[in-house]
Image (tube, rainbow, N blue to C red):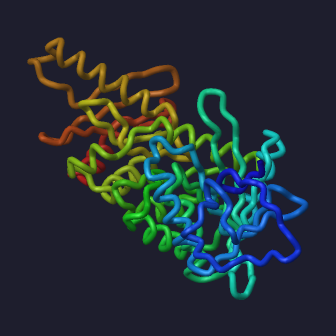
Amino acid sequence: MLKTLFGDLGPRPIGAGYAPTEVAFAATAVLEEAAPPAALPREHDPHVVDVFVSGSPAQSIREHFTKSRADLGSAPSMITLLDPSRIWAPAVVKALSDATGQPVEKLHLRERAALRTLAVIERTAVPRRASGPLKIYHADIRVSGLDHDEIVNALAERSHMTAVIVGALQPHALDALLQSLLIATQQPDWHCPWVVFLLPPNAGAMRHRILSQAWPARVRATTLTETLNGASTVWNTVLSAWEACANAPTFAAAAQAKLLDDSAVTKALFGLVRTEGVIACGVVDLASGELLAHDSRDSLTFDLAARARRLTAARRVFSQGGGEYGAESEELMVTQGARIELLRAGLPPPTRFGLVLMLDRRLANVPLVRFKTLQAEKHLL
């Protein structure tokens, strides 16, 4: 049994007189099941398949994934690597294949009339003990213009996470990339909940530009800062993002309540996290303890959610115990070694959101931090 990029491909005898018939790619099941008449397995490599298309390959992939990955909750875990530089994603796929012993499966999309290559889609799988394999996809697009973006977006929109490897991308190229992703994420076909951008160190302006975009409420855009000096570094960063995203709460509660605006949250946290001594900060649901949004100086802070849950639980216990005059506290501060944990619940009712901060005890000016939280709260009103 041969393997196509997207599923199982049954062996097919290829005679000397074989001529692929013109078929609509959307009508085939090459993405997950059996090979279409126009799919030609290469003689010397069972993991490479040529597919000749007469219609739009992006729309065909989109229509197929609409059926095979209609429910992301039950679909196999999938990460799409988006790499405009074409440097890191192929290296990551190959390195994972070498490390796990899993093959790199390739699908060559070719134009039926001119036989030119439109894209080469690569996939490998990372076995996991606790759950099914994690599928890693990458599309090397050989065409320019709208077709380029459409093929990439067709893969990304049904992924569980899209990792955008920005690296040293020039500002104008980043703007074009953001515009394409913003348009794609606003379409009804987009279902990928997480878009993670991998940025170089000291990219504060770039990070702010990304997070200040008008991302839809159902899409969580975040950034990671890392010096990309090898395929293993890139993969470790992507894997860290995957683990954080898999365990993070969604922004659904805030979106449904319509009490918080994404752009206002981004603006509030962007100013707060740049206060001296602030390591990380976020918006927390005071009722459930869920961390709804967060920001940090360098990268994702994985334990901020746990700290937010502890602080909100402690606040509830204090309130239930009576407190002073039975009132709920507006601020709770906990000092642990070199760290200070601070919960601010100063927003007026019926707002049920607060601010949680993690501070460096040696550097933080607590009165200044309190003043900055008051400014941040004004953006959230």
Residue 164, quarter of picture: bottom right
Q: Position of residue 268 (x, y in %)?
A: 34, 52
Q: Position of residue 64 (x, y in %)?
A: 52, 61
Point 72% across, 64% down: residue? 107
Q: Is residue 10 visible?
A: yes
Give 166 or 13, whichever is nearer the viewer: 13
Q: Position of residue 92 (x, y in %)?
A: 75, 52
Give 373 or 11, whichever is nearer the viewer: 11
Q: Taking 254 as reference, is 318 above or below it?
A: above
Residue 283, quarter of picture: top left
* Residue that protrudes farthest toward the bottom in the picture: 114
- Position of residue 353 in the picture relative to residue 227 (left or right): left
* Residue that protrudes farthest toward the right in the picture: 44
Q: Position of residue 144 (x, y in %)?
A: 64, 82
- Position of residue 102 in the picture relative to residue 281 (left or right): right
Residue 84, quarter of picture: bottom right
Give 190 or 324, whichever is nearer the viewer: 190
Q: Taking 194 as reference, is 51 above or below it?
A: below
* Residue that protrudes farthest toward the left in the picture: 325
Image label count: 0
- Position of residue 81 in the picture relative to residue 245 (left or right): right
Give 123 or 96, whichever is nearer the viewer: 123
Point 69% across, 75% down: residue? 52
- Position of residue 268 in the picture relative to residue 231 (left or right): left
Q: Is residue 229 visible?
A: no
Point 48% across, 62% down: residue? 210
Q: Taking 288 as reference, is 67 above or below it?
A: below
Point 83% across, 67% down: residue? 14
